[in-house]
Image: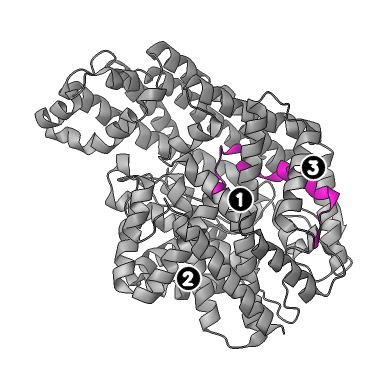
Amino acid sequence: MAKELPKRSEVKVEDTWKVEDIYATLADWEADLAKVSELADKLAGYEGKLNTAGGVYEASRLEEDIEYIAGRLFGYAARVSDVDTGNAENQKLVMRVRSVYVGIMEKLSFIVPELLALPDGAIEKFYSEKPELERYRISINERLRFKPHTLSPDMEKLLASSGEVAAVPGTAFSMFNNADLVFPEITDENGEKVRLTHGRYIPFLESRDRRVREEAFHAMYSTYESYKNTLAALYSGQVKTHIFEAKARKYANSLEAAVFGNNVPTEVYHNLIDAIHANMDKMYRYVRLRKKLLGLDELHMYDNAVPLVKDVDINIPFDEAKKTVYEALAPLGDDYRAILKEGFENRWIDVYENEGKRSGAYSAGIAGAHPYVLLNHSGTLDSMFTLAHEMGHALHSYLSFKNQPYVDAHYVIFVAEVASTCNEVLLVKHLLSKTTDKAQRAYLINHFLDSFKSTVYRQTMFAEFELKTHEMAERGESLTPDTLKKLYYDLNKLYFGEDMVVDEDIAMEWARIPHFYYNFYVYQYATGFSAAVALAERILSEGETAVADYKKFLSGGCSKPPIDLLKIAGVDMSTAEPINAGLKLFDELLDEMEKLNA
């Protein structure tokens, strides 16, 4: 009989996150849903009145209240929905708040055009007339930055009303991938039938039994292959949505539209791909080393995750993972670790996989409550690193909300992966510092090399896939299952090189990556990892000064452009230097790995 996941109702309370910290009861959520609509109606009354300091201030204050409440409404609905995606009532909460929010955005679509229509110098005069307006200077200036891409009031209303339609491909993929898609059973190492799930896939690929790895790999991608037409249509719909929005707002292309929002130049995206292309030799060297250490005549795609050190098997219960992460982050200071401990002890985290739970992991900051971290902890070394990663996000959110006004507290995605990955680098450095055992050391270096490969090379490959598919669609080419599969297969050939047998099944991997629905998101994993390596090295070598600068960055929210915030911490992402520094570390660890296994 197959081992099935527990139902949500069977999960221990202490292993779940505490949604009552957002709303004590559903009735409280309903009250805020009604309240936010009332506030929107009140704010709508300021249409045509944003020509005075008082009008701009009152409208800004109301808008801040609306965004604050809406964030909590979304936060609660998403948290209860994500841990039980098959629960129809929870899904209704998400749909209701999304529908209400789209309606609110329609009502408030007058704000930006009216601000942009003000004569030059008017806003500066308003700050003098009403000093309280200074609270909104950064957010107002950020809106003025979008002036070349802002349309007439009528057109803004039309675009706002298309929000629900634009969300359909991503929503449909999420429901299909998390709630509807059922994978077959496979036979595990013990000869038992076990249901393949998203959460179990990576542990299967880490199995010492190659038959298990191959069976899981084929079962995963043959399942997606069965739905290739539907999945290609969904992804094509998402790409076309991005292109439509870019054209409507007069951007040069969909890439510019995506990165402009984070105030990041398109050159950063292209520079990343160029830098990685110039350093493929290091990736090919890694592939050759993996093939050699595994003792294989042929290295296949399903051999990519199994640890290279055969004699070290690590099972890390969640309590042990928490303890180790807490110890590893000592360089960040007792104040940082006090917040970390609070999260560990007060149910900020939803720990284990259950039936219908969203796959993967994430952190979500919620104003007026605390961050929420979703995990699917499986006891692997990777699970412990995921805990460190997501708690990095969580403390970034916590410190930004604590130190910035709400309007300036939401850091942009470009810097988000820096804090999370910095924790990972500190964790691996901590673990390496504790052992001189050759096998354990090799195991940890292998994990870091795999993380680097997955985060820098692999995510750059994802970024290149996104870029090429959007460019194809912008040229009028169709994104069919065959064209998507060929492009993805060819990229795998390029990134892994001649020493890897690129199995045909991998051509469907694009279909299971939820981040492809996030609009040019994944490149930031690679840039963030590179920045994190530089920051971790500085923290460990310079101590208190570097830590103080780093905490200023963590507390910065969106108070400065992302490139400037990172400069405060000591990293200049306008250059290729951090990427090259990360690649240098990758090369050095390859050296040590080769020596340990000579």
Marks 2 and 3, the one that precedes in the sequence? 3
Marks 1 and 3, the one that precedes in the sequence? 3
Instruction: Count the marks.
Output: 3
- The Cα atoms of the two marked residues, 1 and 2, are separated by 23 Å
Q: Residue at x 20, y 21 (%)?
A: 55
In magenta, the rendered stretch is 499-523
Q: Nearer the viewer, mark 1 or mark 2?
A: 1
User: Height in image: 172 above or below 423?
Assistant: above
Left or right placement of residue 583 versus residue 469 in this view = left
Instruction: Give the quarter of the image for residue 597.
Output: bottom right
Instruction: Give the residue number, with chain letter if any, for mark 1.
Output: 460
Of residues 278 and 583, which is closer to you in this image?
A: 278
Of residues 431 and 505, which is closer to you in this image?
A: 505
- Residue 391 appears in the picture as rendered: no
Residue 457: percent from left, percent from top: 63, 56
Q: Could you tell me which quadrant the C terminus lies in? A: bottom right
Q: Residue furthest bottom?
A: 436
Going by the numbered disc 2, the residue's amino acid type is Leu
